[in-house]
Image (cartoon, grey):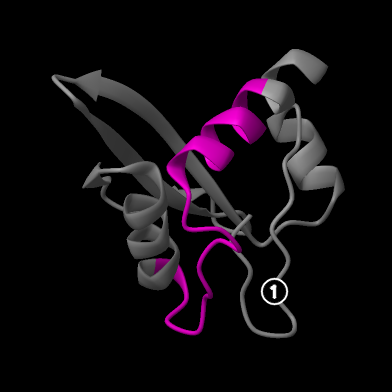
Amino acid sequence: MIAAEVGHTAILVPSMSDAYLGRANRIVHGYVTKRGGGLRFEIAIEDASRHKLTDPVAYSGQMISAMTAAAKSIDPAARGFSTGHEEAVEAWGIASSRKR
């Protein structure tokens, strides 16, 4: 998971209602597509108080490097994943998706 400086917390919620109930001030919307041998992540940030979205930004490449770049664009103090192994992140993603 990507972490940021003290005062910022990233949470995964099942619905937008849960994000608002959790008093989120910024909400990351996004999706991922597979192109050739790589991944493409597109994200936009919502200011929850004004319900305004930023223009979407695309990040391509391996998951860890793309998501680290995305996190740093949101918060320059963001730290990367605790692993550098793409296989570990893939296994975590598969296990997480099965819990829902």
Q: Is residue 80 above or below residue 13?
A: below
- The front one of 10 and 89 is 89
Label 1, residues with CA under 10 Å away: few <14, some 14-19, many ≥20 = few
Residue 16 image offset from top left, x and y in percent: 69, 33
Q: Hey, which residue is sitting farthest right in the picture?
A: 21
Q: Residue at x 37, y 59 (%)?
A: 70
Q: Is residue 78 above or below residue 35?
A: below
- The front one of 69 and 36 is 36
Q: Residue at x 55, y 57 (%)?
A: 50
Q: Assign the C terminus to one quadrant of the image.
A: top right
On screen, residue 63 versus residue 55, left or right, reads right
Residue 45 image offset from top left, x and y in percent: 45, 53
- The front one of 42 and 61 is 61
On screen, residue 34 versus residue 7, left or right, reads left
On screen, residue 16 versus residue 62, left or right, reads right
* Residue 53 appears in the picture as rendered: no
Quarter location, residue 18: top right
* Residue 67 appears in the picture as rendered: yes
The segment highlighted magenta reads 74-94
Q: Which residue is mark 1?
A: 8
Q: Residue at x 36, y 28 (%)?
A: 32
| Mark 1 residue type | His
Q: Is residue 71 above or below residue 18?
A: below
Residue 97 lies in the magenta stretch: no
Q: Hey, which residue is sitting farthest left in the picture?
A: 36
Q: Residue at x 43, y 36 (%)?
A: 30
Q: Assign the N terminus to one quadrant of the image.
A: bottom right
Quarter location, residue 2: bottom right
Say what secondary structure mark 1 lies in. loop
